[in-house]
Image: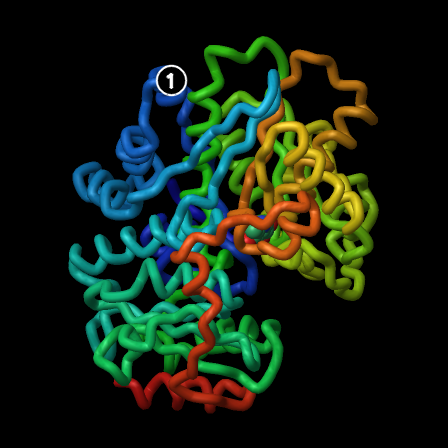
Amino acid sequence: MQFRSTRSKLPLVSYKDAVLNCLPADGGLYVPDQAADFRQFLLQMDEKTSFNELIAAAAPLLLESGLDSVSASRVAKNAFNFKPELIELDEGFSLLNLYNGPTGVFKDFSIAFMSAMFEEFIKEGGKRSRTKAPLLVLAAAKPDTGVSMAHAFGGKEGISLVLLYPSGQLRGLDPSAFAQNGGNIIPIQVRGTFDDCQRLVIEAINDRDFSVPYNVTSANTMNPGRLLPQIFYYFYAFIQLKNRLTGDLIFSVPSGNFGNLTAGLYAWKFGMPVNGFISAMNANNANNAIGSCIYGEPFIPKPLVHTNSPALDVSMPVNYERLASFYDEAPAVMRNMVYPASIDDPLTLETMEYIYKKYSAYIDPHTAVAVAAARKIADERKWSGNTYTVVLATGHPARSPNMAEEATGKAIKVPGSLKKLWKKCEPIALIPPVLDAFESAIASCF
Ligand SMILES: *Cc1c(COP(=O)(O)O)cnc(C)c1O
């Protein structure tokens, strides 16, 4: 599979180049140039196929030209000691639980795969000349993704991970894994916002005097290597269900930066038969701008509004250009493929309560937004009883124990592995939001 920039047709790059030099020079984002064809593969797999078998067979197809099939299978094996879980709550309604990874969010899947893939690339002989580091991975981090990345990259030989946090957000990391203690994690705190962190990562990648000698890439979703592994769990849900489907198949996806939704669209483009995606957003926030845009209006980001599903509070989604590239290709098809819906905070809580009362299951607020959105769209469109809906459960319900209790009236048990994630810690450096300071802080670790 070759990749092109969202902004120009040429030149195409290989999978390996696209993930190791993750930003095209024209300021766009990498997207697959042609669709990989997984149809034969999906025909052969069924509900007896385990997630690991699926990955071992699908990864070589995805990484084609990036890695040979032996290495690709090794990536698959090293990446996952957890798996998605399809829980059928009712006839035609399942949750795809994606929160069984080490930090309780679906992002564990793509981050684990990506770190195993980088490790394999390094074993193969590194990226370019080995001047400073075999591979320096930069990431703008929020508390959850930071922990997930530190978990996946910690101790990986030849890789250093720089986590760039906005003020006051460091928590859940293990200081013994930090560079000053002999580890490979470099947490840096910026006197600024998450947007400053994202901007600094992009500026550092584009500063070739820095990024070439340090072999810099990013672990944020701007990297297509973060995005594409997410198609695996859509495939997994599909093969679990395919012999039972009697009508349409719909996925409902809580959408913040639209990585998960975009990955679903790739799964479809790569041959997975699916009838639609519900793009579930929370209310009043700028995400709705995407909803209007899907219906043909220009995309004008709105100011951010904070809600009780914070991972969906995004005003300018990172994957906007990737999503837009689907619409540029086939706008009419897309209008019948993606259904945006917006759910407010009170309905989010009510939905958590509804699911608990009806099925004795806890769901987290992001998942609740997707459940409510699915019910709303099915209602509006009068979808028939044989439509099968899979809701992506993106977060562990015990990550927001107070809301779980408020919604259900019963306290939820918080696993020890999640409790650890709340412990505050100190960065290696505290810097102003300027590139020089960022680069010097990194250089001081080598
Ligand atoms: C990140 C996140 C989302 C949003 O996913 P995107 O791919 O950014 O749209 C949804 N739910 C949870 C729990 C998350 O952590």
Name the residue beneath numbered marker 1: 46
Could you tell me which residue is drawn at 25 percent across and 45 percent down? 75
Q: Is mark 1 within 8 Å of ligand 1?
A: no
Quarter of the picture holding the C terminus: bottom left
Q: Tell me if residue 9 can be seen.
A: yes
Instruction: Tell me where residue 102 appears, x and y as whole percent.
Output: 38, 53
| Location of residue 133 (image quadrant) | bottom left
Q: Position of residue 313 (x, y in %)?
A: 69, 59
Tag 1: residue type? Asp
Tell me if mark 1 has few (under 14), some (14-19) or many (20+) residues whose alpha carbon lies within 10 angstroms of its own: some
Residue at (53%, 83%) from the top-left corner?
190
Look at the image and tell me in which quarter the N terminus lies. top left
Q: Nearer the viewer, residue 277 or 379?
A: 379
Q: In this rendering, would 81 be left or right of 254?
A: left
When asked about the image quadrant of residue 46, the answer is top left
Element assignment for label 1: loop
